Image (cartoon, rainbow, N blue to C red):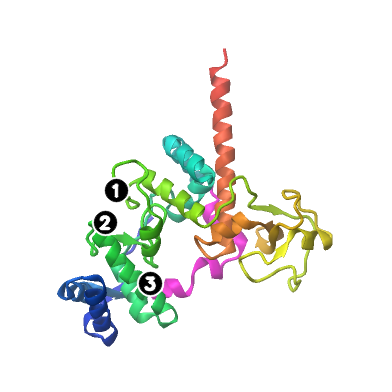
């Protein structure tokens, strides 16, 4: 696949009113050399590609059927199973320490970067500066992330001009944004460095740590398909990602979830437009935790389904290996 270089333009963020205020903040509040921060903003380039991408994310423009086929592919499943086997010890340790299934951790890394094969083409400095100073709807958030990025690169000893990532400034195997990098990245291989850019073992532990910090329930259900139908305007199809209703509400409506016996358990139904028509799913607390990584139920479904496919691929490989070893 041919990757075209992103279209960027010199902006001179260092000379703008907002840029000068940013320089002052980094100097007075965080102890940076003002001239160094000014030089970084002068080097940062505005990108129309980034602005276009953030205005039209796939999670908002595609149906579930369209979104699913991007991520649930035989080659992504095969490479994910190989990634799980290659780093079997790290995945087993992460699952034991944090209670997050290895397949879910791998599902995140598989959806985000195809297991580290594609970590993004944009300089993180360009992405964050473009969104901090040229994207008013979320400029406050991305200005904060630009602060976090400079702090993170200083702490990690990285060149802020060199790190590449996504159009939103996410980095590494698991595509952590700067604040998540600082808060949830861990050294998982014992070398005293939390490297999410080039170290898959640290990435595995850090994704598990992120989920644990966001209250993943070990052995808890994620989601299940439901027989039956709900009209699109049903009050049982709530808009919030966090479950506002309970299993009891759905049972009282004649639906029959099977994974949870406790009728008081929080639950949320979602209606998806799949390849073969509408799909009704009931999602639980752990599904909501996945949406803390990316605030989209399409994203969470992709991670959930890829994790399931990875589990089946591992089982198949193990069964084949056992049959081969039989006398």
**Does residue 6 appear anywhere in the picture?**
no
Q: Which residue is mark 2?
A: 156
In the current view of this chain or complex, which residue is farthest to the left? 35
Q: Which mark is first along the chain, 2 or 1?
A: 2
- Judge whether 27 appears above or below 254 on screen: below
* For the residues bearing labels 3 and 2, Cβ distance under 8 angstroms: no
- Locate residue 216, reporting x and y percent: 56, 52
**Does residue 228 appear anywhere in the picture?**
yes
* For the residues bearing labels 1 and 2, Cβ distance under 8 angstroms: yes
Rendered image quadrant of residue 271: bottom right
- Judge whether 327 appears above or below 181 on screen: above
Which span is picked out in magenta?
Answer: 49-73
Instruction: Between residue 297 and residue 180, name the one nearer to us.
Output: 180
Q: Secondary structure at mark 1?
A: loop
* For the residues bearing labels 3 and 1, Cβ distance under 8 angstroms: no
- Locate residue 231, reporting x and y percent: 77, 69
* Position of residue 150 in the picture relative to residue 224 (left or right): left
Q: In this rendering, which labeled residue sits more in front, label 3 or label 1?
A: 1
Q: Residue at x 36, y 70 (%)?
A: 145
Q: Which mark is first along the chain, 2 or 3?
A: 3
Q: Which mark is first along the chain, 1 or 3?
A: 3
Q: Secondary structure at mark 2?
A: helix
Instruction: Between residue 2 and residue 273, name the one nearer to us.
Output: 273
The quadrant of the rendering that contains the C terminus is top right
Q: Which residue is mark 1?
A: 193
Q: Residue at x 56, y 55 (%)?
A: 302
Q: Which residue is mark 3?
A: 50
């Amino acid at each position: 696949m041919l990757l075209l270089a992103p279209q960027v333009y010199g902006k001179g963020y260092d000379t703008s009113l907002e840029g000068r205020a940013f320089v002052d903040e980094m100097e007075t509040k965080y102890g940076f050399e003002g001239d160094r921060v000014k030089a970084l903003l002068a080097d940062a380039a505005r990108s129309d590609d980034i602005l276009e991408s953030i205005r039209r994310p796939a999670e908002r423009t595609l149906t579930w059927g369209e979104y699913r086929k991007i991520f649930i592919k035989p080659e992504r499943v095969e490479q994910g199973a190989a990634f799980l086997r290659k780093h079997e010890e790290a995945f087993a340790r992460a699952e034991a320490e944090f209670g997050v299934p290895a397949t879910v951790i791998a599902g995140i890394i598989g959806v985000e970067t195809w297991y580290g094969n594609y970590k993004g083409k944009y300089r993180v400095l360009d992405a964050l500066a473009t969104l901090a100073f040229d994207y008013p709807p979320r400029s406050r958030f991305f200005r904060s992330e630009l602060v976090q990025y400079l702090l993170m690169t200083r702490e990690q000893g990285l060149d802020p001009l060199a790190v590449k990532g996504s159009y939103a400034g996410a980095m590494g195997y698991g595509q952590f944004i700067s604040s998540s990098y600082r808060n949830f990245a861990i050294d998982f291989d014992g070398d005293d460095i939390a490297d999410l850019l080039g170290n898959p073992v640290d990435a595995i532990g850090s994704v598990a740590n992120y989920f644990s910090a966001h209250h993943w329930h070990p052995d808890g259900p994620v989601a299940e398909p439901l027989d039956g139908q709900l009209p699109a305007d049903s009050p049982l199809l709530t808009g919030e990602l966090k479950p506002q209703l309970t299993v009891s509400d759905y049972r009282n409506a004649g639906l029959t979830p099977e994974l949870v016996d406790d009728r008081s358990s929080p639950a949320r139904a979602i209606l998806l437009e799949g390849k073969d028509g509408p799909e009704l799913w009931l999602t639980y607390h752990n599904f909501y935790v996945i949406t803390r990584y990316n605030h989209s139920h399409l994203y969470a479904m992709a991670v959930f389904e890829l994790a399931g496919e990875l589990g089946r691929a591992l089982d198949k490989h193990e069964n084949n290996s056992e049959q081969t070893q039989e006398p």
